[in-house]
Amino acid sequence: MQIKYRITLGYTLIVLILLLACGGILYTLSLKNKETDLRAKLQAKAINIATLVGSKQVNDTLLNFLNNNSASTLSDKSIIVLNKQGKTIYSFDEDATQPLRLSNTDIRKSKTSAFHFFKTDIRDAIGYNNGINTIIVAANDKDKNVWMDTLRTTLLIGVIGFIIIFFISGYIFSKNVVRSISKLTDKLTQISSEAFSARLSTGKEKDELWELATTINNLLDRLQSSFDTQRRFLSNASHELTTPLAAISSQLDVALHKERSNEEYKKVFLSVKDDVKRLALLVRSILEIAKASGSVGGIDLTKVRIDELLMRIPGEMKKISQLYDVKLSFEDFPESEGFDILYGNEALLYSALRNIIHNACKFSKDKCAKVSLTYTFQNIVVEVKDNGPGIPPNELENIFQPFFRGYKYENTNMIHGTGLGLALAHRIIELHKGDIYVESVVGEGSTFSIFLPVDSTKTYKK
């Protein structure tokens, strides 16, 4: 069944239930009110009969005349008057009305109660004892019957009419809703990786469909950003991989073109070795980027001491170059345990810190990086300072993009790199729910501030 019919039927069913409930309540209250009026009329009739029977001026003939010509709305009247001994001293049955058939229980209760209401055949009855006689009156109320019949007919017609109206209006409403959803669906089918810039129309009214379209547009924005980043990454990666391979191939072709001396071959091999090292570094960085591009649920998490990771880095830098120097400073070391421990992946965190410190050593004039470790109430803070050429303001927002290279000052254009170190570090820090900020002054150097949450075990709960 199509959704518009399901919506229409559901909408109509709810309305039908409400109408039946309201109609039932109205009918019940009206019936109770009419029954109260009927009892009041029966009670007045019984009291009136008791008064007339007790009068010496009124005989049975006069009583019959009065009962036949009464202006009351009571119909099908039957009246019985019993004396104290239970003998019938007066009885009356309206034309074409069956005589009363009373049970002993009703007679007994009528004698012992001031007013006793009960049902006999299809009529309502009252038993009244005035201390002298017992008067029993049974009758129907023409007004009550007409009123209740009219009310039933009105309610039935009203319910049927409302069902038809609500069904039609519900169908129109659901059709409009489905039409709007169909438009969204048609628009979504037109969006593909080749035409990813298209967006859904949200309209002017901020209703549920507006929220749906806005949510889908936000999702498409995130996906487009991710796809654009992926395209740039793949394009840059293919270029970066092709460059050293092309250089290696061309150098080997030249070397093999003719016989050369051992010194010339050695020179070619050393050049090829540099290109292979660069290629290996590039491949390793790309693999690390791929590993850090997942979610926290896909990596191994353990307790990590940041101070121990930092103390391993100076030796690592010396392996890269004897000129590199890392000065560690652990200030405001907390007295209580646990402030230097976070929950994360040790290998990835070490890679992020190593890349940032390596960059600082590489670009510093004296090849020295100053690293300080401090603590706040919620974060571990690592600051890495260099005295390099600095980063101009227009490049600060791009330094964490893969394959971006700045630092085109003094002799920095001679420094080799893959352009992936900072991008990898940024992704790893984001993966650990941290933040990284850069402050830089051209000609004076840069400071990288890394904030990692101490109590990150709460962050990783699922």
Image (tube, rainbow, N blue to C red):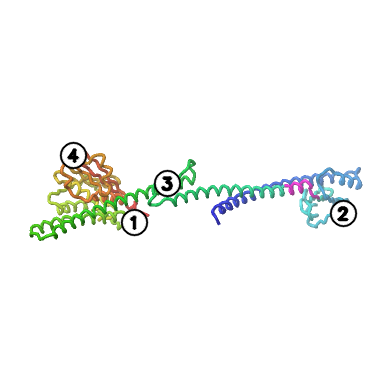
Q: Is residue 182 visible?
A: yes
How would you rate the neighbour count of disc 3 (Cα within 10 Å): few for under 14, some for 14-19, many for 20 or more? some
Labels 1 & 2 near each other (Cβ < 8 A)? no
Instruction: Decide whether the magenta segment is chiefly helix, strand or loop.
Output: helix
Where residue 387 sits: x, y (%)? 17, 42
| Alpha carbon separation for disc pair 3 and 1 | 31 Å
Q: Amino acid at mark 2?
A: Lys
| Alpha carbon separation for disc pair 3 and 4 | 45 Å
How would you rate the neighbour count of disc 4 (Cα within 10 Å): few for under 14, some for 14-19, many for 20 or more? some
Left or right of 261 in this view: 73: right
Where residue 236 sits: x, y (%)? 27, 51
Which of these two is toward me, 449 or 8? 8
Provide the residue designation for mark 4. 444
Q: Which mark is residue 199?
A: 3
| Alpha carbon separation for disc pair 1 and 2 | 98 Å
Provide the residue designation for mark 1. 297
Give the residues in magenta. Answer: 139-150
| Alpha carbon separation for disc pair 4 and 1 | 41 Å
Labels 4 & 1 near each other (Cβ < 8 A)? no
Provide the residue designation for mark 2. 87
Q: Amino acid at mark 1?
A: Gly
**1 or 2: mark nearer the eye:** 1
| Alpha carbon separation for disc pair 4 and 2 | 128 Å
Q: Amino acid at mark 4?
A: Glu
Q: Quarter-wise, where is residue 406 in the image?
A: top left
Q: Secondary structure at mark 3?
A: loop
How would you rate the neighbour count of disc 1 (Cα within 10 Å): few for under 14, some for 14-19, many for 20 or more? few
**Is 141 one of the magenta-colored residues?**
yes
Residue farthest along the front direction in this orientation: 258
